[in-house]
Amino acid sequence: MTALGNVEENRVQDKERQIAIANTVKQQISMLALMSMGANKLNWIKETKEYSGGLSFEFQNTSKIKKGRIHIQLTWSDTYTVVLIGIDWKKEKVFKIVKDVYCDTLSETLDRLVETDEILSSWKR
């Protein structure tokens, strides 16, 4: 196999690994949480120096934000950094960054980012 073939094979393996990470993140989020946010345009996040990959998606019509994007980035320490981005007239603004989120609190963290306390308390009744 040529060096070019090895590079292409590594690129395919890296992409497959990134997609697998994104799918794992998605499985760790409650389907109800994704549905209540109107999650759409799910996509994988590439590996960086700080993150081994992750999942991003757009959402709409929550009690706090009309339209936004969430990035869930898997850190090398096996916790998540969740980034909440608001979208207004095609301009994006980072509203909040939550670090050191564990997989078992991921759905609750997402709910608290996009829904008001009043809405969250009404769900618990």
Image (cartoon, rainbow, N blue to C red):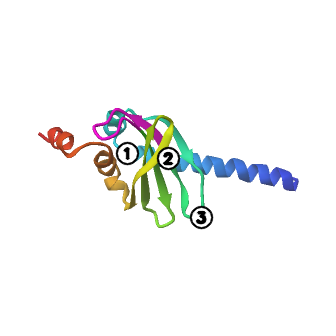
Q: Secondary structure at mark 1?
A: loop
Using the image as rendered, state which of residue 68 and residue 72 is in the foreground. 68
Q: CA distance from mark 2 to mark 3?
A: 16 Å
At a point 43% along the width and 58% down the height, the residue shown is 80
Using the image as rendered, state which of residue 68 and residue 30 is in the foreground. 68
- What residue would you read off at disc 3? 49
- What residue would you read off at disc 2? 55
Q: CA distance from mark 3 to mark 1?
A: 24 Å
Residue type at the position of mark 3: Lys
- What residue would you read off at disc 1? 29
- The answer to whether mark 2 and mark 3 are in CB contact below 8 A is no
At a point 78% along the width and 49% down the height, the residue shown is 8
Q: Position of residue 4 (x, y in %)?
A: 85, 52
N-terminal of the pair, mark 1 or mark 2, is 1
Using the image as rendered, state which of residue 93 and residue 39 is in the foreground. 93
Residue type at the position of mark 1: Ile
Is 2 included in the stretch rendered in magenta?
A: no
Q: Quadrant of residue 97?
A: bottom left
N-terminal of the pair, mark 2 or mark 3, is 3
